[in-house]
């Protein structure tokens, strides 16, 4: 017999919970900082060289884990919360980390592809969070 938990409070019937998205976004940046520290230490103390593919994989992995966390904090639509975390992370990281970032880049096919991949990575994390 399934037990349904009734939610009361501000997010009781909310389809999108901004607090869950914010937690996921903050967690994504923290996780990226930890991953960059580990990868930087490995590159410094060994002969391993970080490739762009390894850096992108780490970034999308951080998005997926952060999407998972956002979905766990959301009452419903975990995939959407994770996808939004992925998009916001990509846009925020581009704005913060790339000086004079060309915002028109996002309307090119390459920019739309990166945005779609970030959304899919976050949504995949959100879907995995809802599997039981």
Image (cartoon, rainbow, N blue to C red):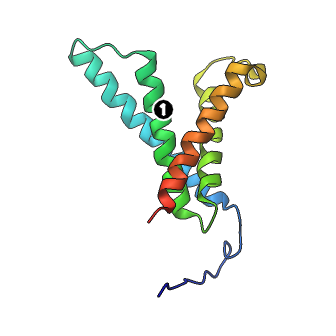
Q: Nearer the viewer, residue 119 or 24?
A: 119
Quadrant of the image containing the C terminus: bottom left
Q: Is residue 39 left or right of residue 86?
A: left
62 in relation to 15, above or below: above
Residue, far bottom? 1
30 in relation to 95, above or below: below
Q: Quadrant of residue 73?
A: bottom right
**What residue is shown with label 1?**
59
Q: Position of residue 34 (x, y in %)?
A: 37, 36
Q: Is residue 39 left or right of residue 70?
A: left
The residue drawn where x is 66% and y is 32% is 115
The residue drawn where x is 73% and y is 20% is 109
50 in relation to 131, above or below: above
Label 1 SS = helix
The residue drawn where x is 58% and y is 50% is 82
10 in relation to 100, above or below: below
Q: Position of residue 47 (x, y in %)?
A: 23, 11
Q: Nearer the viewer, residue 70 or 22?
A: 70
Q: Position of residue 77 (x, y in %)?
A: 64, 61
The residue drawn where x is 37% and y is 33% is 35
């Amino acid at each position: 017999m399934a037990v349904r938990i009734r939610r009361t409070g501000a997010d009781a019937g909310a389809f999108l919970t901004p607090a869950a998205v914010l937690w996921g976004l903050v967690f994504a940046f923290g996780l990226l900082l930890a991953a960059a520290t580990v990868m930087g230490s490995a590159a410094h103390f060994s002969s391993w060289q970080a490739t762009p593919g390894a850096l992108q994989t780490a970034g999308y992995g951080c998005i997926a884990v952060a999407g998972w966390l956002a979905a766990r904090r959301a009452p419903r639509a975990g995939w959407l919360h994770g996808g939004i975390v992925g998009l916001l992370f990509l846009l925020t990281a581009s704005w913060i980390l790339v000086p004079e970032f060309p915002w028109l880049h996002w309307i090119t096919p390459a920019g739309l592809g990166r945005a779609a991949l970030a959304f899919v990575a976050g949504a995949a994390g959100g879907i995995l969070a809802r599997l039981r």
